[in-house]
Amino acid sequence: MYLNCHSYYSLLYGTFSPKELAENAKNMSVQKIILTDINITTGFYEVYLDCQKVGIDVIPGVEFRNDHEVKYIAIARNPDGFAEINRHLSQHLVIGLAYTETAPDFNNVTVIYPLSYTGNSLREHEWIGIKYWELGKLYKLNVDHEKLVAWHPVTFENKTKF
């Protein structure tokens, strides 16, 4: 499973069409993806339909960013979680508020922070994501290793498509 997939709805970042994202997941023998377009949920339904056609499960989420700075990824655990994510997203986009370092205390959402997260201790539904190029930093950090997840964004297929 990939927990940080982007479609071209992540404007200027993801390059996959919903159909390409679904077909690539199928070709890689991935059974489940999490769509986390940047500050938007508009593409979820289209991605969901294309994934259903090829037998891939898709979970909704959002990568919350202030400009180019990732604050956290929110992943819905159920339809109520998707509603929580959309309310949080709408509140910030309508008012123009920046996202804080720490996610709200969601009830039905799993949160993944970047390794650079400096907030308070992690709640039960929160994790730290680590990218493969950050593995060497682990020995220096005071991080609960049981709260780490592999974080490998899927944004484009290859250098040519980038």
Image (cartoon, helix red, strand yellow):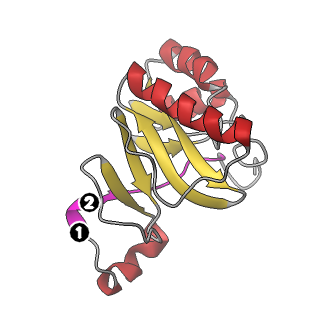
Q: Position of residue 119 (x, y in %)?
A: 41, 67
Q: Tell me the SS state at disc 1.
A: loop
Q: Position of residue 83 (x, y in %)?
A: 48, 24
Q: Is residue 10 visible?
A: no
Q: Is residue 55 magenta?
A: no
How crowded pointer 1 is (Cα within 10 Å; few <14, some 14-19, many 20+) is rated as: few
Q: Amino acid at mark 2?
A: Lys
Q: Height in image: 145 above or below 31?
A: below
Locate residue 51 relative to residue 55 in the image: left or right. Answer: right
Q: Residue at x 52, y 13 (%)?
A: 53
- Give the spatial CA distance, label 1 vs label 2: 6 Å
Q: Height in image: 63 above or below 138?
A: above
Q: Is residue 153 magenta?
A: yes
Q: Which residue is mark 1?
A: 144
Q: Amino acid at mark 1?
A: Asp
How crowded pointer 2 is (Cα within 10 Å; few <14, some 14-19, many 20+) is rated as: some
Q: Position of residue 23 (x, y in %)?
A: 57, 27
Q: Mark 1–mark 2 contact, CB under 8 Å?
A: yes
Q: Which residue is mark 2?
A: 147
Stretch of the chain drawn in magenta: 144-156
Could you say which quadrant of the image residue 80 lies in? top left
Which residue is at the front of the view, 64 or 12? 64
Which residue is at the front of the view, 96 or 76? 96
Locate residue 128 relative to residue 26 in the image: left or right. Answer: left
Q: Residue at x 38, y 39 (%)?
A: 106
Q: Height in image: 148 above or below 87?
A: below
Which residue is at the front of the view, 97 or 53? 97
Q: Position of residue 82 (x, y in %)?
A: 47, 26
Q: Name, please, the residue furthest toward the front.
A: 95
Q: What is the quadrant of the N terminus in the image?
A: top left
Could you say which quadrant of the image residue 81 lies in? top left
